[in-house]
Amino acid sequence: MDSRYARHGLPTTRLGFRPAILTTVERSRDWWTQAQADLAHAKAAVAVCHFDWACFAAHQAAEKGLKAVFERRGEKAVGHSVRYLLSAVSGEETSPEMVVAAKVLDKHYIPTRYPNGLVQGAPTEFYTEEEASDAIRRAEEILRFCNRLLAR
């Protein structure tokens, strides 16, 4: 098939369509900005007693902060486990406390949002201000680590 792309020497598929050309854009700033916004959302959720959402937003902040680090390094991070993302940051020493923080945050990924993540009841009935404050503190710890890596 003679398409306008082929006439100009551009590659085409056998049907004459030009394949999409995807360029890789370094987006660590976008990931970091969203991590900060998610942390702010976690704090705002505590203020209105949405402790389940505060815990989830804290998880999201840590996850996105780590993904900013991968992005800055030109690596792609897949998945949502803060613990596994943290362990995959190559060449960096993480404290046992930070690994515990990541594990705690991972526990807030599903049950904070889905009633079937708990035996019975809605997540909003189970999460406490203490848990939300703890999740925020742990997310802040991981974000400080990420910030140090991004500042290099």
Image (cartoon, rainbow, N blue to C red):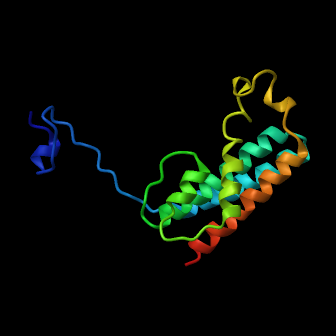
Q: Camera-side residue: 42 or 87? A: 87
What residue is at 83 percent from the left and 47 percent from the top?
132
Q: In this view, does 67 lie to the left or right of 41?
A: left
**Which of the 4 image quarters holds residue 53?**
top right
Q: Residue furthest front?
A: 96
| Residue 46 locus on image (x, y percent) | 87, 47
The structure residue drawn at horizontal position 64% and vertical position 70%, both measured from the top left corner, is: 147
Q: In this view, does 10 lie to the left or right of 47?
A: left
Q: Quadrant of the C terminus?
A: bottom right
Residue 138: image x %, image y %? Answer: 75, 57
Q: How many labels does the image show?
A: 0
Q: Is any atom of residue 8 visible in this view?
A: yes
Image coordinates of residue 144 in percent, x first then y, are 69, 68
In front of the other: 48 or 86: 86
Residue, x 61% and y 67% (percent of image)?
94
Residue in view at x 60 percent, y 52 percent: 83
Please say if 101 is above or below 7. Answer: below
The residue at the far top in this view is: 120
* Residue sitting nearer the eye, 133 or 120: 120
Residue extending farthest bottom: 152
Residue 38 against residue 28 in the figure, above or below: above
Q: Where is residue 92 in the image (x, y as percent from the top left)?
A: 54, 70
Asked if 25 appears above or below 104 in the picture, the reply is: below
User: Residue 14 falls in which quadrant of the image?
Assistant: top left
